[in-house]
Image (spheres, rainbow, N blue to C red):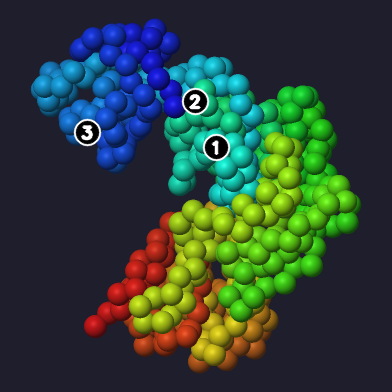
Amino acid sequence: MVTMSAARLAELTGGTIVRGDGDVVFSGAEIDSRAITPGMAFFALPGEKSDGHSWLGAAARAGARVAVVCRFDDEVAAGLPATPLAVVLVEDCTEALRELARQHRSNLRCPVVGITGSTGKTSTKDFLVAALGSRRRVAATRGNRNNELGVPLTVLEAGPRTGVLIVEMGMRGVGQIAELCEIVRPTMGVVTNIGQTHMELLGSQDAIAHAKGELVECIPAEGRVFLNGDDRWSRALKKKARAPITWYGLGQRCNVRATDITTDDLGRPTLTLRASRRQATVSLPVPGRHHAYTAVAAASVALALGANLDEIAEGLAKVVPTGMRMEAFTSASGVIVVNDAYNASPTSMRAAVQALADMHTAGLRVAVLGDMAELGSLTELAHFRLGEAVAESGVERLVTVGPRARRIADAAVAKGMDPAAVRPCATSDEASEVLDDLLAPGDIVLVKASRSMGLERIVEGILEPHA
């Protein structure tokens, strides 16, 4: 991770040391005082909900050696404990963080993999980390740090001994991935797919493809681009590439592909990875046959980084997904829960419902689906079509949460699902009460919606049912 003196940090960011000694050295950086460990630098970012300057004291007490601030008045100074904290005053804390990441990136000599796409970014990152196994020391995006603040922090976690840096890149508009690439300078780029997320902001899939394609454009000619050979939008992305392309997917023309896909009783896929006349069979520990794409995307990059198929298959069999991404577990009451509540889009919703349909149980399969956000003019149609897909899937019960998701319920009934098997709910609390009465040992319940719905509360309610 980044290691530097306060004086050097001030020099790089155009800042001034207003407290402490410039010779103080820090290792690592954070913007959340709760995540500070001894020796780190704390960037006091101003914000609408919480101003980092209010947490300077907490960061210092947690062991921060350096603090970067954009104001240092008597009130801020008075809140600091008597610790050897060096304080660097800058004009803009966010830009200071980015500049530090830019400078740190210039010192890295490892391959840097950028990952974007409408769905599957985090899973692809998780699978790639697993596919590389212990072959190289890997630094990768943690949690949901794929935005303008999380990406610099991820870069700063890499160090001279890092073998591969993997950076997940999200976006909310045109130009944002290009800005992140200016910091990350990826040598390899993966685009998972082009879906209908962010339609409200960008208006069309063509605009989404243009925005995601910024990663492809940023990969240098000596690098490599990895594209989904089964996604029709990849043809447009191909035109943007300067670097050679590896195609991955299920189709025969893909350079790296998955075949012979089957699922077990819990919906976990087994597949054969094929590349350059070699093959390896892998059983994935997470439900969902759509993870075949995740596996081949990760395998494509791992192969380019020098791993062999057997190593890759061994690593993928041990993948640990980030929380709330098809995270399956059994509650104390014997209900199998598939927690995919982190986010949702029409594509990922359908994939999750199919994963639930592929699972076998003597009990009920219950889909708890909430509102999908940022779909713009597609909102009504996307929810309605999802409801039709639920009815056709064979899932026995449907619980919807939120006003938009009511259209999922309407469509499921219109498509032939028994109205008694469909329960539209306005809130998570209402849905939790329904599930308290509905669920029994052996049932399988999928929970999924856009992040704004916070459906993890329903998962918590299953773990601790209402009295």
* Residue 389 to residue 105: above or below: below
Which residue is found at the position 74% from the left and 50% from the top?
309
Looking at the picture, how far across and down is residue 438, in whole percent? 41, 87
Sequence-wise, the earlier of marks 2 and 3 is: 3
Judging from the image, what secondary structure is the residue with disc 2 in?
Answer: loop
Which residue is found at the position 31% from the left and 39% from the top?
35
Residue that label 3 marks: 62
Residue that label 2 marks: 159
Q: Nearer the viewer, residue 136 or 101?
A: 136
Looking at the picture, how far across and down is residue 183, in whole percent? 55, 24
Distance between mark 1 and mark 2 Cα atoms: 10 Å
* Residue 419 to residue 298: above or below: below
In the rendered image, the quadrant that contains the N terminus is top left
Judging from the image, what secondary structure is the residue with disc 1 in?
Answer: strand
Residue that label 1 marks: 138
Circle 3 or circle 1, nearest the eye = 1
Pointer 3 local density, CA inside 10 Å: few below 14, some 14–19, many at least 20: some
**Do residues under tags 3 and 1 come within 8 Å of each other at their CB atoms?**
no
Looking at the picture, how far across and down is residue 174, in whole percent? 62, 36
Looking at the picture, how far across and down is residue 178, in whole percent? 62, 29
Position of 205 with respect to 49 (left or right) is right
Q: Amino acid at mark 1?
A: Val
Q: Amino acid at mark 2?
A: Gly
* Residue 290 to residue 36: above or below: below
